[in-house]
Image: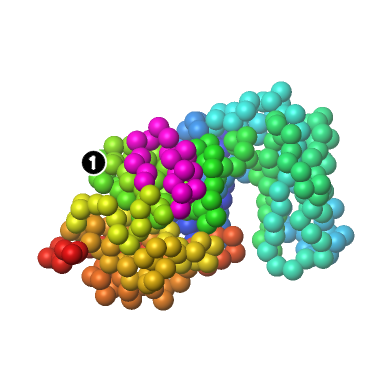
Amino acid sequence: MTAASLVARCAHGLEPTLSAEILQLGLGAITHLGHRELHFRALRPGPVAPRTADDVFLLAGHRPDPGTARRDVAALSRLAMEVDLDTLLELRRAHGGPGGVTGVSGVEVSASFLGGRNFNRYDVEDAVGSVLARRLGVGYHSRRTAGAPPPGHTGWRVTLDGLRATLMLRIAERPLHRRDYKRHTVPGTLHPPLAAAMARIADIRPGHTVLDPCCGAGTLLAEAGGQAPRAVLYGFDLSVSAVRAARENTAGLGVVVGRADAGRLPLPDGSVDRVLSNPPWGGQVTALGLLAASPSHWWAELRRVLAPDGTAVVLLPGLDELPLGLRHGLVPAHVQGVRVSGAQTFLVRLTAPTRPRRTRK
């Protein structure tokens, strides 16, 4: 069987992190790095599910971008006509997806494009999806209806970037960013691939004590536990509903979740090797307790519990709060802009240099 050409999609800004994960796991050789996606050639058959990816697809084919006029949409049907469906579906099975034509009960398509167009995404989806469904002898589920497709429908994606139109087939039955552990959610819950990226950047080692002082639904803790099963994980939140959700979502991972103020944590000085946190400064969640009085309490407590040479990886809506971290002796080592759901955020890694610290009275 020929090597498969794969496309991994991710949040804008996570492209380098996703590329590093694919290379580290030996999933393939990178052939192209683009906007929100990277292309790679699989080195061998087997499941391909990097945690920092929103989704992974088989590259089905591409043609020149047809243009911006509504009449140009019809040309996209050629993408669907030219696909070697038998080979593509066999490659899907070889990389962990459902096998063969018999595993296809229907077709659904998701489309996106860069730049202004005189047509919408549904026009693109219908032009491609109707042809694929006809060739496969199954039904087509149009996203114009806004309903979820029935089980067994293959997920296809079409992208138009101004230069070319690309058709892809999802390997898994559903997008990778939909985690099985995510049974409960709360406002401000973190996008799982972004949480996975934060855990990777933190470089958690066996035996490390890891803390999320504002754990919400426990997404960061679940991703950290999946990557570093021999770490010791703690999560705290003042919200009763968040604590309940975090306990449910991290069940079986050995995570200790409790109710506490992030400005006064029930942990000794210097007892934490890694901090992962999405603090409540972004507007979706209101700061409670001591954090409502001043963000300085959060930074001071983070510095207090962090061990000498420890690392904190935090997600901030802007860099205005970073000087507070500097005043408390934290040193920025990495800043990475990430756009999630249209909002610009910053992923920041900070270190705690070895030096005497004042104990909280």
Residue 281 in sight in this render: yes
Residue 21 in sight in this render: no
Q: Position of residue 82 (x, y in %)?
A: 75, 41
The crowd level at tag 1 (other Cα within 10 Å; few <14, some 14-19, many 20+) is few
* Residue at 53% in and 66% down: 283
Q: How is the image coloured?
A: rainbow
Between 177 and 100, the one lying in front of the other is 177
Between 213 and 84, the one lying in front of the other is 213
**In the figure, residue 99 lies in which quadrant?**
top right
**In the figure, residue 223 lies in which quadrant?**
top left
- Left or right of 248? Residue 298 is left
* Residue at 23% in and 41% down: 207
Residue 202 lies in the magenta stretch: no
Q: Position of residue 183 (x, y in %)?
A: 54, 39
Between 67 and 140, the one lying in front of the other is 140
Q: Which residues are magenta?
A: 239-258
- Left or right of 180? Residue 218 is left
Between 186 and 51, the one lying in front of the other is 186
Image quarter of the N terminus: top right
Can you identify the residue that label 1 sits on? 207
Q: Given the current orientation, which residue lies at the most extreme left position?
A: 356
- Left or right of 245? Residue 325 is left
Tell me if residue 227 comes above or below residue 311 in the rendering.
Answer: above
Element type at marker 1?
loop
* Residue at 73% in and 59% down: 65
Q: Given the current orientation, which residue lies at the most extreme right position?
A: 71
Looking at the rendered structure, the kind of residue marked 1 is Gly
Residue 243 lies in the magenta stretch: yes
User: How many numbered circles does the render carry?
Assistant: 1
Image quarter of the C terminus: bottom left
Q: Position of residue 282 (x, y in %)?
A: 50, 66
Q: Position of residue 94 (x, y in %)?
A: 56, 28
